[in-house]
Image (tube, grey):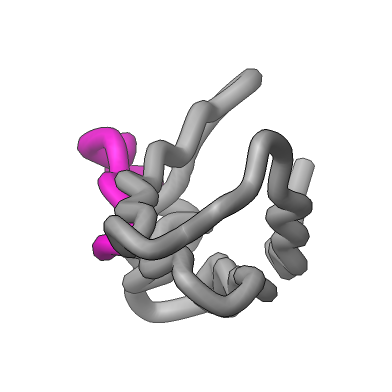
Amino acid sequence: YWKNPGDVGMPTVVALDLPAGLEAGEVRWPAPARFVHEGSVSYGYEGAVTLLVDLRAAPALQAEAVQVKARVEWLVCD
């Protein structure tokens, strides 16, 4: 499902865990497909989907490597 699942389903949720000095922009969602089943309309994807998020590092960030964690929750239907 998409961030707005429509009449049924649940929205996909993305939660980022970022270290200090790193900020995230909004999730960039690809346009979803529209599905109609027994009169209910839902929005989502078929197959693999890539969700992009811009990350901004503070000028004072002194790191060669940082760890970014993401928790993504979604619902899949047949």
The question of residue 65 being in magenta is answered with: no
Q: Position of residue 12 (x, y in %)?
A: 55, 67
Q: Outermost residue, top direction?
A: 47
Q: Position of residue 39 (x, y in %)?
A: 36, 66
Residue 32 found in image quarter: top left
Task: Classify 23 as above or below 56.
Answer: below
* Drawn side of residue 75 relative to residue 61, left or right: right
Instruction: Report the residue at 42% width, 57% height from top.
Output: 2
Task: Classify 69 as above or below 45.
Answer: below
How many discs appear?
Answer: 0
Please give the range of residues in magenta: 25-35
Residue 24 found in image quarter: bottom left
Given residues 75 and 35, the one toward you in this image is 75
Q: Position of residue 6 (x, y in %)?
A: 34, 73
Residue 16 found in image quarter: bottom right
Q: Position of residue 10 (x, y in %)?
A: 58, 78
* Drawn side of residue 74 relative to residue 1, left or right: right
Given residues 69 and 36, the one toward you in this image is 69
Instruction: Report the residue at 63% width, 47% height from top.
Output: 63
Task: Classify 35 as above or below 46.
Answer: below
Query: For the C terminus, which image quadrant?
Result: top right
Instruction: Report the residue at 47% width, 59% height from top.
Output: 61
Q: Do we see residue 75 in this rendering?
A: no
* Drawn side of residue 37 relative to residue 54, left or right: right
Instruction: Report the residue at 46% width, 65% height from top.
Output: 22
Q: Do we see residue 18 in this rendering?
A: yes
Task: Classify 43 as above or below 73.
Answer: above
Given residues 75 and 13, the one toward you in this image is 13
Q: Main secondary structure of the magenta part?
A: strand
Given residues 45 and 17, the one toward you in this image is 17
